[in-house]
Structures are given as structure tokens and as C-alpha cells.
Image (cartoon, helix red, strand yellow):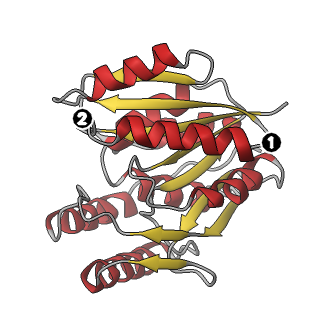
Amino acid sequence: MKTVDLVIPCYNEERILAESVEKLRAWAAANLPYRWRVVVADNASTDGTLAVAQRLAERHPDDVACLHLDRKGRGRALKKAWLDSPADAMCYMDVDLSTDLAMVVPLLAGVLDEGCDVAYGSRVSRGSDIERSWKREINSRGYIAFIKLLFWTKFADAQCGFKAMAHDAAQQILPHVEDGEWFFDTELLIIAEKGGYRLKEVPVRWVEDPDSRVKFPQDIIKMARQLIKLRFRSLPKRPA
């Protein structure tokens, strides 16, 4: 049976972590045709998040694992969790589970059953059903337009916190992803598409988290600068 790691990166999420993990476990047990485990990737939380994650791993040793990093950064936590994973595929979702879990099925099917290297959730593709503020909608569409202007990419949504990778693709791509924070998702997709890897877009049902840690416009400006820097990097190609 194929294996999957369901990774939840978190920073200072002690309030909702246990509920989210239990919800994900129950859903996975009822819906996934793969052998799975939940991996909580704590990146330098300063509250009780790590203790909650450790208790969950002790309570459910067969299907919950805890990973701790001493340095903050969602991308840093994902890179560590995915590179260390022995699973056939890895996916991640935000701790608030803002994306409908039903979308995990086509996301994982893309990399496990359809031969894709990377699958990504898209909030702007046909078939998506989203609830978010007009400010975030404008920022998101402007950001993806800037990416297309610089790189002529085809993917429709860079920053949706909902992605999956095949094991071999992760081992090949992730060592080239340098950002350890919010730009991680964008950098990953650009390197994958420009390198000749096969991507799958998955429409999602998604509800905006009012407690989002993304800061506007500071983070958008920072990521725009990182895009320009990436534009002048030599990007790797998929091995023949």
C-alpha cells in the first residue's frame, strides 16, 4: 500500500492544534486509500504548541509524529519534514484546515496515481469555492500576475497552503528551494514548473482564516523582492 505523510506546519497554535489533528485523523481514517500518518512540524513556537504535539504523538503513536525545529519558518518546517519523510508522497495543509479536507483526495491522487510530481490547491481556478476579503483577493491576483510577468508560468495560485509532492520529486527539488518562510510555496512551484516537472492544479473549497499570520502589505513586498532575485538565479532542470 502506498504511504502518505500529512504535514501540519505550526507556530504558536496550541489553541487549535489538538482539535485540528483529531479532525484530520478521523477524516483520513474514513477517506484515504493509503497508509498515512499526521506529522506536526512545530517551528520554534513560544507557547505550548510543542507540548500539545508531543502529547498527540504519545496518544497516537501509530499515526501521529512530532517534528520540532529551533528556528521559525513555515517553509523551513516543510522542507525538513518532506526531505526526512520515507513516504511515497507528502502533502501539507494549514493548521486551521481552511481548505476542505475532501480536496486532499484529488491532491494526493495527482502525485500517487496520475504520475504528477507536484499538486497544488488553487483558489482561483474554475470549480473553486472560496470565501475571503476583497483585499486578500486583490493582493493574491496581483501577486500571481507579477509571477507570470517575470517567469511566464502557468500555475494559477502560488500561496494556497495546500500542496503535495511525490517523494522523488521532493528529493530533487527541495534542496534548491532556499526560502524558509512564506515565499517557500512560490519558489517551489516556479522551480518545479520551469524545471520540467509535471504539476496538477486542484480546485479547492477554502474559507479565509481571520487569524492569518500573513501581513499585508509587508509580506507581499518582501516576496516581490524575492521574485526579482529568483528571476536572476539559474534554476535546475529535472534529471533526464
Instruction: List the residue tagged with mark 2.
Output: 72
Q: Tell which tag, 1 or 2, sits nearer the viewer.
A: 1
Whole-percent x, y for residue 83 in the image? 54, 29
Residue at (83% x, 50% y) in the render = 113
User: Is the residue 233 above or below the residue 167 in the image?
Assistant: below
For badge 2, the amino acid type reads Lys
Quarter of the image holding residue 80? Answer: top left
Q: Earlier in the sequence, mark 1 or mark 2?
A: 1
State whether residue 68 appears in this view: yes
User: Is the residue 144 above or below the residue 220 in the image?
Assistant: below
Whole-percent x, y for residue 211 in the image? 23, 59
Quarter of the image holding residue 133? Answer: bottom left
State whether residue 166 appears in this view: no
Whole-percent x, y for residue 209 in the image? 32, 63
Instruction: List the residue tagged with mark 1.
Output: 33
For badge 1, the amino acid type reads Pro
Give the tally of numbered discs.
Answer: 2
